[in-house]
Image (cartoon, grey):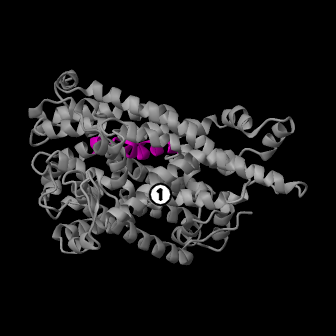
Amino acid sequence: MDKAKPNQLVGSATKHGVLLLVTIVLGFPLLWMVLTSLKSNIQALAVPPVWLPHPVLWHNYPNVLAAVTFLRYVLNTLLYAALTIVGVCISSSLVAYGFSRLQWRGRDLLFKVMVSTLLVPFVATLVPLFVMYKRFHMVGWYLPLIVPTFFGSSIFSTFLLRQFFMTIPQSVSDAARVEGANEFTIYARIILPMAKPAMASVILFQFVYCWNDYLGPLVYINNQSSYPLSLGLNQILGTYTTNWPWVMAAATMATLPIIVLFFFTQRTFIGGIAIQGTGSKG
Amino acid sequence: MSTQAFTEASRPAKSAAGSRGRLRGSWRTGLLFISPWLIGFALFFAYPFFATIYYSFTNFNGVGTPQWIGFGNYTALFHDPLFGTSIYNTIFYTAFELPLSTIVALGLALLLNLDVKGRSIYRTIFYIPSIVPIVASCMIFVWMFNPATGIVNDVLTSAHIPGPGWFFSVTWSKPSLILLGLWGVGQPMVIYLAGLQSIPKAMYEVADLEGAGPLQRLRFVTIPMLSPVILFNVILQLVACLSYFTQAQVIENANIGGPGNSTWFYVQYLYEQAFQFLKLGYSSAMAFFLFVASAVLMVLLFRSSSRWVYYASED
């Protein structure tokens, strides 16, 4: 073992060196975003580059907030996220229950059908959906993006919950059945309370999905006062292309909440992805 | 996808007594529970899917009734140079992004799987880029890679390397988007990491006894054990690459970069035909063509998987 020691030290130093290098490469864009957001435009464009803002221009932030309806975009996004979270939590957990806690003919076939719809490019249904929503006068606000979530449209959530439900021993349900509980009671009173961590993952994923969703709103939201953050940011990028500190301030305000949220919920987050990934072998 | 893993965890078979009636009862209950999805599937998937096929044989602008024109849209497609351009760009992006993102995500996961202090901090930092809002990450990259004032070319210049035009150059605009894509591989990375951590330690011990070096361990233990997870990620990435849209559209909408048609992707063209020109029949033909093309690729991928994907028996 004595012989191995210097080797191990060198090895561990190399490992940390590589990890640090990758950290710098992956982290730099975000650092540069924040640094640029605190500079004057002249400093931002200076050649050779000015690395640290001097003086620190905090007022780029209030200036952006005054120039564009940023908070309005955030509110729209939060409303969009909240309503779809309700839909996903209700429908995905019901469907997941039917696909995991109950044994019935055709279950596995239907489950395969559900999972395989994930492999179909979204544009294969896009145009008729738009025509349909247009006929029902639902285009213009978030309804076309909210309503489907009440009908199990979030297949990843259903999948994740199903994986989790299967880890709960069947004896839990059997004990309740002996006492005469029906399936809905078992679902609502026993299984759901046990599935809180998985539900937390589902809520987080749905929130991040809505916060970042660009395509859905692009198709269905045509009124600027209803824009979500993504479309609002796109407009800021198009309008202020010559004022990079402002653009970066807007990017920072859109990114920071999601990073903070991630910091506090990492375990739930990463755990959820791992369940999806490893549960899907085959 | 086969569902071995899923069915295994299902409950033990019931006792034979009275199974018929109870089975029918449980059938009804099962369908009741999944009914939200069944309704959603019919309304928001099956109907629009078949409607896409129908529209693709018609002339339709969204109001009134579609007019049947047979294969008219398809013949028009194959004479449309922009259709070819958008296919070329999409294939180009997929051909590089798919293998590169797999290698990068796997590489990062292997790094995170090393036995070092502070692993969880590294993991956090490696994952964060993938949750940055897409529009924000586009902003950051277009700014950093700005040919005249961006930090990347500033640094390259100080190293006496002439920096390219990145997003503003016909040759470099697609590679720039590929770089942007590689920055956000956190999702597959975490899935690979979970896969790596589920490989039994004993397998590596056996490999060590056989005198395997690090590369042989990777080649003969890690990759085969991880191959089902690789297949899963590659499939999802493939669907995402073929439907590549958002980043290119953000740049298009903001009128920065993407010169000529160098970043004009398939789904962008489809989107434009449908929602700007209301050529719904034409865009439906594009949509169905993409579906067929991706289905063919999926079948090829699954066929090939029997040769390289290794399923360990679960017990």
Residue flagged by tag 1: what amino acid is it? Ala
Q: Is residue B249 left or right of residue B203?
A: left
Q: Nearer the viewer, residue A209 or B73?
A: B73
- Disc 1 target residue: B46
Element type where label 1 sits in the image = helix
Identify the residue shown where x is 21% and y is 21%: A62
Few, some or many C-alpha atoms within 10 Å of disc 1 (few <14, some 14-19, many ≥20)? some
Visible residue check, residue A3: no
Quadrant location, the N terminus of chain B: bottom right
Identify which residue, B235 or A187, lies in the foreground: A187
Q: Position of residue B228 (x, y in %)?
A: 56, 65
Up/down of A64 relative to B250, above or below? above
Left or right: residue B223 versus residue B160 is right
Q: Residue at x 65, y 45 (%)?
A: B33
Q: Is B126 included in the stretch rendered in magenta?
A: yes
Quarter-of-image position of residue B18: bottom right
Indicate yes or no whether the magenta region holds residue A179: no
- Looking at the picture, how far across and down is residue A123, in whole percent? 35, 57
Q: Is any atom of residue B148 visible in this view?
A: yes
Position of the C terminus of chain B by quadrant: bottom right
Q: Position of residue A255 (x, y in %)?
A: 33, 35
Question: Main SS of the magenta segment?
Answer: helix
Q: Is residue B80 left or right of residue B33?
A: left
Give the vertical position of B235 relative to A244 (above or below). below
In the figure, A71 relative to A205: above or below?
A: above
Callout 1: chain: B
Foreground residue, A28 or A248?
Answer: A248
In magenta, the rendered stretch is B115-137
Q: Nearer the viewer, residue B135 or A141?
A: A141
Image mark count: 1
Residue B305 versus residue A220 in the image, above or below = below
